[in-house]
Image (cartoon, grey):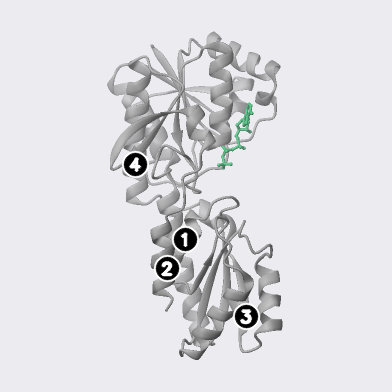
């Protein structure tokens, strides 16, 4: 393998730049040529490539987002689009690629690898932490810090006015952000897609909390929580059924995806980038780099996209105890 391409795909996450930097610098160190592809698979189909050397990635380790941009590509979902992408890679003498993205991006890589026997390695970049084969995805730790910081601020105003806040955080299918940030920020209740707390229990818990003398309450709600109600409907529900509370809603939204990556994400990205390039040079392919017990491991992409990482039941118990 003499030339490796790197790109970011799907939703962006903090730490993607640190991962690009790591792939580019590892290539430079090992004397392998490196090419950046702009806008993920869309740029691959359109031939939007740029040679990268160690200096092209100066001063990006601390930046959120991705300097290579990200996109969703419909054309790559078609055999014709993938043929065009393959022709562009061959025309540029590219022998392998490293894709930094989520499960959709890995599905694309796996299909491409099957069709063209093209060497691919994935690095999990998504704030949702929903990929099997790694305890942490790039951006998850930064997103947690962002969410905890936001909730701390909301708590200041909540307690000044004795209010109840429903705070919506990202997580359509998984509750990792909600559960971890909820425990970290001392939320009274955490509603996640994996568990149905039930509206009755929520009311009971809020009633108890008020009786016990708490001046404010924060309930974290993952986007895909199981109550069947969104944050605004939850507000209405509580106002109708528990009029003792002055209720407000805060939807954190895309701010969770941005910002300066945490040291944890930068270190993780640097380690994963090195391993991804090394794996390709060892002749490995169709694998994702992950971390488990602080060791880098390689998991077949097929497995990585099939399973979600399970929610930590122990953390649910801790959260229950803490909200006493
Ligand atoms: P996020 O976790 O933020 O959703 P993601 O990587 O899962 O990130 P997707 O939009 O699902 O984001 O996928 C990114 C791109 O991967 C798609 O726009 C498409 O180009 C490619 N892709 C996804 N699924 C397939 C597929 N079945 N076949 C070919 N390409 C695919």
Q: Find residue 80 and report its image quarter.
A: top right
Task: Name the residue nearer the viewer: 289 or 265.
Answer: 289
Q: Is residue 68 visible?
A: no
Q: Secondary structure beneath disc 1?
A: helix
The residue depicted at 52 percent of the width and 51 percent of the height is: 257
Mark 2 and mark 4 residues within 8 Å of each other at the beta carbon: no
Q: Earlier in the sequence, mark 3 or mark 2?
A: 3
Mark 4 and mark 3 residues within 8 Å of each other at the beta carbon: no
Q: Is residue 97 left or right of residue 81?
A: left
Determine whether 126 is above or below 239 in the image.
Answer: above
Task: Name the residue nearer the viewer: 105 or 299.
Answer: 299
Confirm or reject: label 4 Cβ below 8 Å from ligand 1: no
Mark 2 and mark 1 residues within 8 Å of each other at the beta carbon: yes
Residue 196: x %, y % from top left:
58, 62
Q: CA distance from mark 2 to mark 4?
A: 27 Å
Check disc 3 and report the residue beneath it.
Answer: 247
Mark 4 and mark 1 residues within 8 Å of each other at the beta carbon: no
Residue 166: x %, y % from top left:
58, 72
Check disc 1 and report the residue beneath it.
Answer: 179
Q: Is residue 247 visible?
A: yes
Residue 180: x %, y % from top left:
43, 60
Check disc 2 and report the residue beneath it.
Answer: 319
């Amino acid at each position: 393998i003499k030339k490796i391409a790197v790109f970011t795909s799907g939703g962006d996450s903090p730490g993607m730049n640190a991962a690009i930097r790591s792939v580019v610098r590892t290539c430079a160190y090992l004397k392998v040529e490196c090419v950046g592809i702009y806008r993920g698979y869309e740029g691959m189909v359109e031939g939007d490539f740029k040679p990268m050397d160690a200096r092209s990635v100066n001063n990006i380790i601390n930046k959120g987002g991705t300097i290579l941009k990200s996109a969703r590509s419909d054309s790559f979902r078609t055999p014709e689009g993938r043929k065009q992408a393959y022709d562009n890679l061959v025309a540029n003498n590219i022998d392998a690629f490293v894709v930094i993205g989520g499960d959709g991006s890995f599905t694309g890589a796996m299909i491409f690898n099957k069709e063209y026997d093209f060497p691919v390695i994935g690095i999990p970049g998504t704030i949702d932490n929903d990929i099997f084969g790694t305890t942490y995805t790039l951006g998850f730790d930064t997103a947690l810090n962002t969410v905890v910081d936001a909730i701390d601020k909301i708590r200041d105003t909540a307690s000044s006015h004795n209010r109840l806040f429903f705070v919506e955080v990202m997580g359509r299918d998984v509750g990792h952000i909600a559960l971890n940030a909820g425990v970290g920020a001392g939320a009274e209740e955490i509603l996640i897609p994996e568990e149905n707390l039930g509206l009755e229990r929520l009311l009971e818990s809020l009633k108890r909390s008020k009786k016990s003398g708490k001046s404010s309450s924060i309930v974290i709600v993952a986007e895909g929580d199981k109550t069947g109600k969104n944050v605004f409907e939850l507000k209405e529900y509580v106002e109708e059924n528990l009029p003792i509370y002055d209720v407000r809603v805060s939807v954190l939204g895309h701010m969770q995806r941005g910002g300066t990556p945490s040291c944890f994400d930068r270190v993780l990205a640097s380690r994963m980038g090195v391993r991804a390039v090394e794996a390709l040079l060892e002749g490995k392919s169709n694998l994702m780099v992950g971390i488990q017990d602080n060791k880098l491991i390689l998991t077949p992409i097929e497995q990585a996209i099939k399973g979600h990482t399970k929610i930590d039941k122990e953390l649910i118990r801790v959260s229950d105890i803490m909200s006493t």
